[in-house]
Image (cartoon, rainbow, N blue to C red):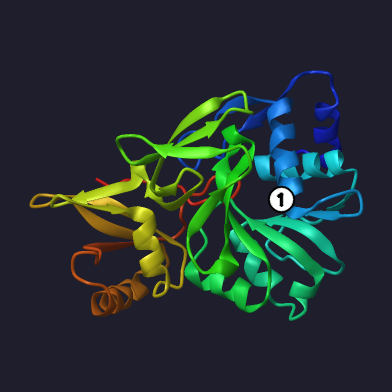
Amino acid sequence: MATIDDFIKQWRDGNDYIVAHTSGSTGRPKEIRLLKSDMVASAMATNNFFGIDSRSVIGLPLSVDYIAGKMAVVRSLLAGCRLLEMPVSNELHIDSHIDLLSVVPSQIDSLLTDPCVADRLGAVIVGGAALSPGKRTALTDAGVRAFASYGMTETCSHVALCDMSVGNDVYKAMPGITFSVDDRDCLVIEAPAFSFRRLVTNDIVDLVDLSSFIWRGRYDNVINTGGIKYAAEELEVLYSIYIPVPFYVTSIPDDKWGEAIAVVVECDEVEVDGLMRTLRSVVDHLRCPKKIIAVDSLERTSNGKIRRNRLG
């Protein structure tokens, strides 16, 4: 794992780019070159949004092997503020004031064990994976000013943020960014200040206006069962209230409907029947999975994201 000093040396090496790697959650990880000018533009927008300046403290409990960690360092360098290096761990504890903290969902539970955490945090950016309704509610109930982020390695971190305290799922563009959709209803990012200018994604959205959208799921993960299309991610939000173990939604071949909804859970066989009974009792039959498959361990990417596999 690279260190912060390793990254700072690369940042100051005279090249106009940084070598980075995609997470691999939507395909094989790949090496890409990010222009430092794009990273500067992204960092400046975030610093301005959250009021980060030389007096601020930015907390970093993430690896600089990935874009979220790299961008936390860049924000601190540009602001001239203190960067608080923290253990890269799901056991996250805040002992002093932090103005801006970037985390992944698996770190939230430990964060909230401290009843005074809201007093120590200015703002929290949550990224890396979708956040369950329960964790969103826990953050807002604790008084934490938290934002879900939308972005990717290619965009140098987030291009939109969703303020969880507002109580809706609308992501709003960072300054200088606008949105449109293609004929698949997938998001198109318009970013004239960045080198990529325009980026077509595989994320299905409901476009609210040119600067905001509601994220539905990945086009790659749409399940077409009997002509009705479901985003796997939306089903995961629905099921997450009732499934207490790590899981993901996928599809299996079905002779009658083409595809059927399936759930892959990380647990032993004894729990599967009970999970299915629960889901059948609370979820309408169209959105209820046809099959639950138990595995000892879900496949994960190097930074902990669950890797989805279509079955059959």
Query: Residue tagged by mark 1?
Result: 49
User: Within the image, what quadrant is residue 59 found in?
Assistant: bottom right
Is residue 233 among the parts visible in the rendering? Answer: yes
Asked if residue 243 is positioned above or below residue 60 in the image, the reply reads: below
Numbered disc 1: secondary structure:
helix
Figure check: 115 above or below 60: below
Q: Position of residue 51 (x, y in %)?
A: 79, 53
Q: Amino acid at mark 1?
A: Phe
| Quarter of the figure with residue 119 | bottom right
| Residue sitting nearer the eye, 288 or 272 | 288
Side of 2 where 29 appears, left or right: left
Q: Quadrant of the C terminus?
A: top left
Q: Is residue 221 left or right of residue 102?
A: left
Residue drawn at point x = 46 percent, y = 69 percent: 245
Q: Position of residue 263 (x, y in %)?
A: 32, 60
Residue at the extreme top of the image, as rendered: 15
Answer above or below: position of 302 versus 282: above
Single out the residue that lies furthest toward the front. 209
Observer able to see residue 61: no
In the picture, which quadrant includes the N terminus? top right
Residue placed at 34% from the left, 61% from the top? 235
Q: What is the crowding at mark 1: few (fewer than 14 residues within 10 Å), some, or many (at least 20)?
A: few
Q: Nearer the viewer, residue 195 or 8?
A: 195
> What residue is shown at x 36% (from left), y 75% (from top)?
271
The percent coordinates of residue 308 (x first, y second) are 41, 48
